[in-house]
Image (spheres, helix red, strand yellow):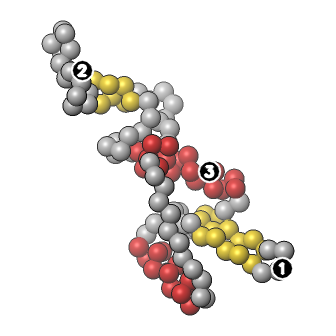
Amino acid sequence: MRPTSLRALAAIASSAGMRMRRWDFVAAYLQGDLEQNKVVYCHAPPRYARIGTDGRPRVCRVEKPIYSMSQAGRRWQRSLFPWLLDFGFTQCGSDPCVFTMTKTMIDGNQQRLTL
């Protein structure tokens, strides 16, 4: 989310007397999937033998995104955004990382959820 979007949402919430909550998705980057037919390799972890018996460096094939990957956040984003849209959220045109949903409750009041 862009800093200007966060400031705007905070100003709107403050002027309307709304509460803001923050969520932290633990291990979110690990929830994405790598692209189909794309093979990614990385160096062996420190506790594993870095040189094979044949004298060549060992590498590991990566099957899920890991924190050190430059595209880990983007991979998670590509799996989260379609789910939010299917769930009924609307993506903001000026900041693609902001999603909103407005629901009318039984008592007639409207609830707005912004992610």
- Where on the picture, by quarter, is residue 69? top left
Q: In the image, 28: left or right of 115?
A: left
3D distance between C-alphas at marks 3 and 1 = 30 Å
| Residue type at numbered disc 2 | Arg
| Residue type at numbered disc 1 | Asp
| Residue type at numbered disc 3 | Pro
Q: Secondary structure at mark 1?
A: loop
| Residue behind mark 2 | 58
Q: Nearer the viewer, mark 1 or mark 2?
A: 1
Of 23 and 38, nearer the camera is 23
Q: Earlier in the sequence, mark 2 or mark 3?
A: 2
| Residue at 33 percent of width and 28 percent of height | 41
Q: Which residue is most to the left?
A: 55
| Residue behind mark 1 | 107
| Residue behind mark 3 | 82
Q: Which residue is most to the bottom?
A: 15
